[in-house]
Amino acid sequence: MAVDAYRDGAQIALGRLASGDISLRLTGDWRLRSGLPTPASFQELLRSQDRLQRLVVDASGLHHWDSGLLAFLVGVREACRARNVDFDAGDLPAGARRLLTLATAVPERQGARRSSAAHGFLTLVGDETVKLWRSFGGMLEFLGQATESFGKLIVFRARFRRSDFVEVVYECGAAALPIVTLISFLVGLILAFVGAIQLQQFGAQIYVADLVGVAMAREMGALMTAIIMAGRTGAAFAAQLGTMQVNEEIDALSTFGLSPMEFLVLPRMLALILMMPLLCLYADFMGILGGAVVGVGMLGLSVTQYVNETIHGVGLVDFAVGIVKSSVFGVLVALSGCMRGIQSGRSASAVGQAATSAVVTAIVLIIVTDGFFAVLTNVLGI
Amino acid sequence: MSSASDQSPQTGDAETQAEAHISVRNLDMAYGDFLIQRDLNFTIRRGEIFIIMGGSGCGKSTLLKHLVGLMEPARGEVFYGSVDFWKASAVDQLRIKRQFGILYQSGALWSSMTLAENVGLPLGEFTDLEPAEIRRIASLKMALVGLAGFEDFYPSEISGGMRKRAGLARAMALDPDILFCDEPSAGLDPISSRLLDDLILQLRDSLGATIVIVTHELASIFAIADDSIFLDADTKTMIAHGDPRVLRDHSSDPKVRNFLLRGELGAQAATEVGGAAAG
């Protein structure tokens, strides 16, 4: 008879009983932590037996056991069923016998098991395309609803709580000042350093003021503020709305006949659209201040010189371009944050995904739109 | 109506028609291609307490979402009085929705608002009351559910049971025509659960509201139900319709009797014969 030790502890062997039936002898400790024989090893033993009709479990050598034994026996029983062999629990301990019965008391629900079959390449491409198309549809739908609620706002028919709006204004306005200060000051400083190294070669260091002023006003002020707000506020919007989705708070609003678009999305969009230009203007000045620190501290320019050169070099049009851009970026950050939040699934990981995807969507849209603006201002000559 | 064989009450006489408040006809529910339940037909009469019961995962809460207009049916209609909800105009849908009060499983209180603001919000939005008056009414509704004094607490500062009661206070804010409750007593201790049942009964008796409850708490079901349906996950349709007390003793489907007898017939017996009685 085949006797085989697989690991220390749990062992299986086949033997022949006096009645002529085959016995499955289980010996040693059958615990999850001490390792168990695999069902494949049992099947190998089974294959060596011809004309097997009945398998009796012999548990006389069994010491300790836990659910590891059950998992193995369920496998054994299935293998027996597949080969039309009768399975007899024999002298299995009463506890194990009860659990084995319990494991099969409720038959498996037909059709419930997910198929893990690998899909073909074309199926995957098709699935992804359909998903992409649906998400595009969802985006358009959200955009339409947002526009509709803005229309209602214009004719004073939008419903939302003023206190919510004020709180969001504070959150995405005043509360963002420290980070905007730090980042834009440093960006101004860096721009001045980079410019200074080049311009000093021609003795034209005074133009550092123009460089920093124009770059901040037209480009960096708006761009940096938008990226900060995408990471800070856009993600927060997505997480807030996503969590509200999980807690059924959004369902509760819509079943009261209150539109989540008006009640949740509109105040957030409005607040960001109003606050972004202000933050952008503030960032412009902070950047210019950073440039001045380099200009005055390192390049030997006087404060008056630096200020005069900045006033001379940077026109109102430059500031206007930056501010218009930042308003548009504000819309993009608010839209992507709110959209991902509202479309979020109802689980903790879905909320995380919504926040991530809000930031990614916003940054991609910001950069693409900025490129579009660069071409537009060039064509218009401003 | 004690069994699966006679579960279509809405085709009855004119008198039944007159008091029908919600009628569901040939309703199929699905998430995408995944069918949840099919061929649901039942009528909820005005002023009755109607229970939707069934095992876990059979689609009870999904049916509730269909009844309150959160999910569109894959097929079939939901009528409020004589109005087909999904064929009605947006204005009519809104008008119907404003007759609803809904108690969600988790309470679903708006987490950024205090309890009084939660209860007061619908009043502020849909009435012309002064803020002070709204606050007074909100306090009254909270007192009705035993939460007097908690007006200025936020949902995160109170227990799960209290959140549920606050959710009920909010659902009752506008004295709704129809109150939907999703597992109101789940997760509550027996006494709170009993109090909630009493509260629901009183609401019905004093305000005359129609009350639709999704639950599988047998004690609640026998204490308050006027009528009920039983949804089955295996056959994906309703397998019984009627007074749960009658169903418990006389249903022709052992699965329904077993459920209402808390499994006394044995799990095996019921799962084996369950499929046979459908339709």
Image (cartoon, coloured by chain):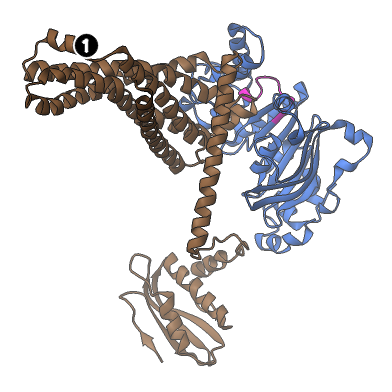
In this picture, residue A92 sits left or right of residue B209:
left
Residue B18 placed where, x, y %? 89, 31
Residue drawn at the location 69% of the way across and 36% of the way down: B213
| Image hue for chain A | brown
**Disc 1: host chain:** A
Q: Pick whichever, A277 or A195, lies toward us.
A: A195
Q: Quadrant of residue A188?
A: top left
Front position in the image: B262 or A34: A34
Near-viewer residue (A230 or B56): A230
Q: Colour of chain B?
A: blue
* Residue stretch rendered in magenta on the structure: B169-179
| Mark 1 neighbour class, 10 Å CA radius: few under 14, some 14 to 19, many 20 or more | few
Identify which residue is drawn at 68% across, 61% down. Answer: B271
Q: Which amino acid type is shown beneath numbered disc 1?
A: His
* Residue on which the image places disc 1: A312
Residue found at x 93% / y 35%: B14
Magenta stretch encompasses residue B177: yes
Asked if residue A71 is among those painted magenta in the image, a careful observer would answer no
Residue A370's place in the image compared with A88, above or below, is above
